[in-house]
């Protein structure tokens, strides 16, 4: 079974994280989830998740009607978790949405929490690391940090939905970005119609 880490940080766009989890779980991918302090705040403010952290799986199950049996939530501070080691199985990691703060930390290899460490491990093990930044406008430091992670092997997928597929809902908009993430992970999907020229 394929195993992907999903990190959720405190950039606006909780919907991108939720739709990513939905898509991966629907494709029967095992998902390790790590959420930053501000990530939890954005999940509350933008997605209405008011529960305790341990209720997050139930929230996803009710929201999308998907099984969360393959989803494991890891504490942000648990630097002894399996995700912190290159020896544990992982088929890639997505930071969605990725704040400029976490982007900077990954770009500089700080590894201060489980999100930063797992991203560091993904890079050193040459695994797929997808960073989904959301900020506008961007300053030179932020742009340079994106270059730094790209040079280190990450794929930068800005949260930039397209409109040619004629989205009708926020979910459609988010699923465009999620589709790009799944494609990069090598997962076939039908989240939006392929462009036929
Ligand atoms: C309502 C709200 C929206 C925010 N949106 C963004 C954003 O879109 N992009 C960003 O880089 N930071 C944003 N921030 C700032 C981050 O949450 C802040 O830098 C935080 O320290 C990020 O920490 P984390 O990366 O550990 O989640 C926002 C903060 C708040 C309170």
Image (spheres, helix red, strand yellow):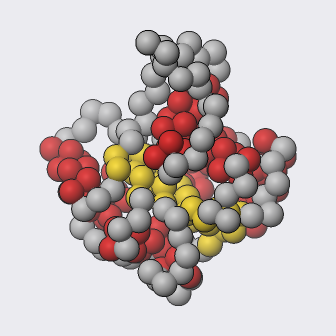
Where on the picture, by quarter, is residue 119?
bottom left
Q: Please count the marks in the image.
A: 0
User: Which residue is painted at 35% across and 50% down in the image?
Assistant: 155
Q: Quadrant of the N terminus?
A: bottom right
Instruction: Give the vertical position of 175 relative to 117 (above or below).
Output: above
Instruction: Give the vertical position of 178 relative to 82 (above or below).
Output: above
User: Which residue is painted at 35% across and 68% down in the image?
Assistant: 126
Residue 102, horizontal then vertical, whole percent: 37, 59
In this image, 68 relative to 188: left or right?
A: right
Where on the picture, by quarter, is residue 111?
bottom left
User: Which residue is painted at 46% across and 27% down in the image?
Assistant: 161
| Residue 189, visible in the rendered structure | yes
Residue 41, horizontal then vertical, whole percent: 58, 52
Residue 61, horizontal then vertical, whole percent: 81, 50
| Residue 33, visible in the rendered structure | no
Residue 4, horizontal then vertical, whole percent: 57, 62
In this image, 12 relative to 32: left or right?
A: left
User: Which residue is painted at 49% across and 15% down in the image?
Assistant: 196
Q: Work out whether residue 177 or residue 191 is closer to the camera in this orientation and state it.
A: 191
Where on the picture, by quarter, is residue 138?
top left
Q: Work out whether residue 46 or residue 187 is closer to the camera in this orientation and state it.
A: 187
């Amino acid at each position: 079974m394929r195993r992907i880490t999903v990190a959720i940080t405190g950039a606006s766009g909780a919907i991108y994280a939720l739709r990513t989890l939905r898509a991966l779980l629907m494709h029967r991918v095992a998902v390790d989830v790590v959420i930053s302090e501000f990530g939890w705040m954005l999940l509350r403010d933008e997605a209405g998740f008011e529960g305790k952290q341990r209720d997050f799986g139930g929230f996803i199950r009710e929201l999308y009607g998907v099984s969360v049996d393959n989803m494991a939530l890891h504490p942000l501070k648990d630097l002894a978790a399996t995700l912190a080691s290159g020896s544990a199985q992982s088929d890639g990691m997505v930071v969605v949405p990725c704040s400029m703060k976490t982007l900077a930390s990954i770009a500089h290899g700080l590894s201060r929490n489980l999100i930063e460490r797992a991203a560091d491990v993904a890079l050193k093990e040459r695994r797929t690391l997808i960073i989904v930044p959301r900020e506008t406008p961007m300053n030179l430091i932020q742009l340079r940090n994106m270059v730094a992670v790209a040079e280190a092997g990450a794929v930068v997928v800005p949260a930039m939905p397209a409109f040619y597929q004629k989205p009708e809902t926020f979910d459609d908009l988010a699923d465009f970005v999620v589709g790009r993430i799944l494609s990069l992970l090598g997962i076939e999907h039908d989240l939006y119609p392929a462009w036929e020229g």
